[in-house]
């Protein structure tokens, strides 16, 4: 069997790197449970590709929003969870917390 050509190795490395970048870009941000809730931005328009622009829209949207980030091409705003939502989330399957 002949050794792999440098072009094939380079193409394979590029594909692997692209997959890693896509996975990192679409992974859900990690937050400490019970402290941060998220909701879709009501003011962000279009495809969300830049966390900074999403964050700026979210913080301008409401004084309760602490940050914002892109996830699955949509802008999600982060707020501190109300204490009643934390208790309710523990008892039900659908959760707002990331």
Image (cartoon, rainbow, N blue to C red):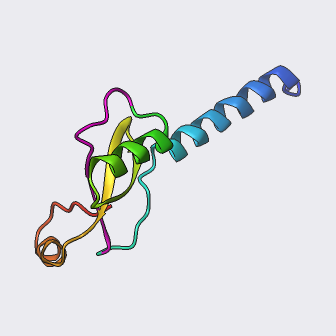
Taking the spot 46% from the left edge, 34% from the top edge, the residue there is 49
In the image, residue 71 lies at what x, y percent? 39, 44
The residue range painted magenta reads: 35-47
Against 71, residue 90 (above or below) is below
> How many numbered marks have been drawn onto this rendered protein structure?
0
Per the picture, the main secondary structure of the magenta-coloured stretch is loop
* Residue drawn at 32 percent across, 51 percent down: 77
Left or right of 19? Residue 66 is left
Q: Quadrant of the N terminus?
A: top right
Q: Between residues 8 and 38, which one lies in front from this camera angle?
A: 38
Relative to 27, 93 lies left or right: left
The answer to which of 18 and 56 lies nearer the viewer is 56
Does residue 29 appear to the left or right of 35 in the view shown? Answer: right
Q: Position of residue 97 (x, y in %)?
A: 27, 64
Occupied quadrant, residue 41 = top left
Q: Quadrant of residue 74?
A: top left
The residue located at (28%, 47%) in the rendering is 61
Q: Is 75 in the magenta?
A: no
Q: Is residue 8 above or below residue 95?
A: above
Q: Quarter holding the C terminus?
A: bottom left
Between 90 and 43, the residue placed more toward the observer is 43
Can I make out residue 52 in this image?
yes
Q: Is residue 61 left or right of residue 10?
A: left
Q: Is residue 5 visible?
A: no
Q: Position of residue 90 (x, y in %)?
A: 17, 76
* Residue under the point 80% across and 29% down: 9
* Image position of 74 with respect to 78: above or below: above
Q: Nearer the viewer, residue 92 or 84?
A: 84
Q: Position of residue 22 (x, y in %)?
A: 53, 38
């Amino acid at each position: 069997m002949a050794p792999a050509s440098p072009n094939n190795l380079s193409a394979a490395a590029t594909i692997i790197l692209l997959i890693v970048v896509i996975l990192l870009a679409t992974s859900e941000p990690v937050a400490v449970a019970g402290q941060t809730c998220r909701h879709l931005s009501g003011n962000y328009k279009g495809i969300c590709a830049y966390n900074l622009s999403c964050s700026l829209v979210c913080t301008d949207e409401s004084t309760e929003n602490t940050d914002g980030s892109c996830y699955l091409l949509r802008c999600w705003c982060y707020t501190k969870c109300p204490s009643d939502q934390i208790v309710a989330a523990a008892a039900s399957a659908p959760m707002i917390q990331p």
